[in-house]
Amino acid sequence: MTNYIWKSIEPISDKDRVIDLAAMRPLYESWQISKERLKQSSEASLREFNQRLVRRLSVETGILERLYDIDRGTTEALVAAGFVEDIVSRSSTDIEPSRLIDILRDQEAAIQLVMDCVAKNRPLTKSVIHELHSILTRHQETTTAIDQFGTRREIPLLKGKFKEHPNNPRRADDAIHEYCPPVHVDSEIDNLLTWLSEYDAEDPIIVSTWFHHRFTQIHPYQDGNGRLARALTTLVLLRAQLLPLIVDRDLRVEYITALELADANDLSPLASLFARLERSAILQALSVDVDKAISEQRNLTSAVIERLTDKFGKRRFARDAELRKVNSVAQDLRSRAHSALELAFNQLGTAVSAVAEPEIRVIDGGQDHKNSHWYKYEVVASAKEAGKFANFS
């Protein structure tokens, strides 16, 4: 067990500057030329190409943080068609589809703000970072905090405001990873932004890697730091005329391992990962005819939506049929219960008739009797006792 002790962030070092990224430099130039050509000949297609990258980033960044999971097929449909709730079936994700779409739209809105900052040459300031954090956590009300005794508790999540409590995670081996104490966050972010403004002439992959790691070292917010770090890293890359950073879910272990090695003063594995991801994105952009790709993507989108519509239609029909079957069973059980109660009460009535003349009535309830609301409380209470939710729709 080795604890990580927090220390103040450091600027880019000479050791960082000599990380070998020579293979990337010809690609920088090729992408600049290609992008300018596409801006002239096919601006709308280039914009749509970038939007698909933004949607993919918006999906993958939450998966990395274990906010949700989505199967690959649904991921591709969302990237192609946009964040539409009807595309997401309950079996394709581990949270409610409506909540998933809310989170995805928040993450997409944050990246759109990043792109807007780049387009309008808006400087990166603490207020911009706060604004991004507020957008990313719009649908998150609480987070988990650990007090000085190691007790975990839910606290309100401060949105767009630096943390007020330590957020030092305990790992599986009981080691503690200590992030920047709340009292030093403001000054550390000042240092980060000051140094970033001085690195315009540095290699953009090195700068984005350095910035990403240092931001995660600070961990300035109670929650949402990973998502925010990737959004801000995308801002750094876009300002260098490169493409968004998309860390796929399958790279999660490599990504976290590279961050841990950067904690130990070795930035090269993280830089190599970022370079590989950027290289892949650039080659993808260079190797396709964007107009043709967009047309094919629209056809794919239509086919995906048509297939999903057909699948969901069949599921709804099967579900409705199953519900009707449940109703039939319920009505049969109600009929049997009615008969059994009448028999029992009649026998009881015979036994007590010598004392008084009993009045016995057994009343049926249900949708078909227009009185189901009489029994709503009992249904809710029974559902709660069974640990279930009573869906009256």
Image (cartoon, helix red, strand yellow):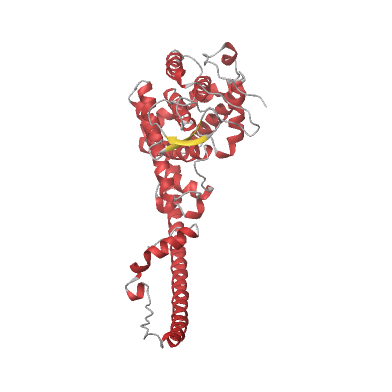
Is 284 situated left or right of 101 in this image? right
Question: Percent x, y for residue 155?
Answer: 44, 35
Is 357 situated left or right of 250 in this image? left
* Foreground of the two, 361 or 30: 361
Quadrant placement of the C terminus: bottom left
| Residue name at image x 47 percent, y 73 percent | 325
| View extreme (front): residue | 355
Identify the image quadrant of residue 348: bottom left
Residue 79 visible, this angle: yes
| View extreme (top): residue | 14
* Foreground of the two, 388 or 290: 388
Identify the image quadrant of residue 254: top right
* Foreground of the two, 278 or 63: 63
| Residue name at image x 39 percent, y 25 percent | 129
Identify the image quadrant of residue 328: bottom left
> Does residue 196 sit above or below 276 in this rendering?
above
Question: Percent x, y for residue 311?
Answer: 47, 61
Report the number of numbered marks.
0
Question: Percent x, y for residue 260?
Answer: 60, 26
| View extreme (right): residue | 1
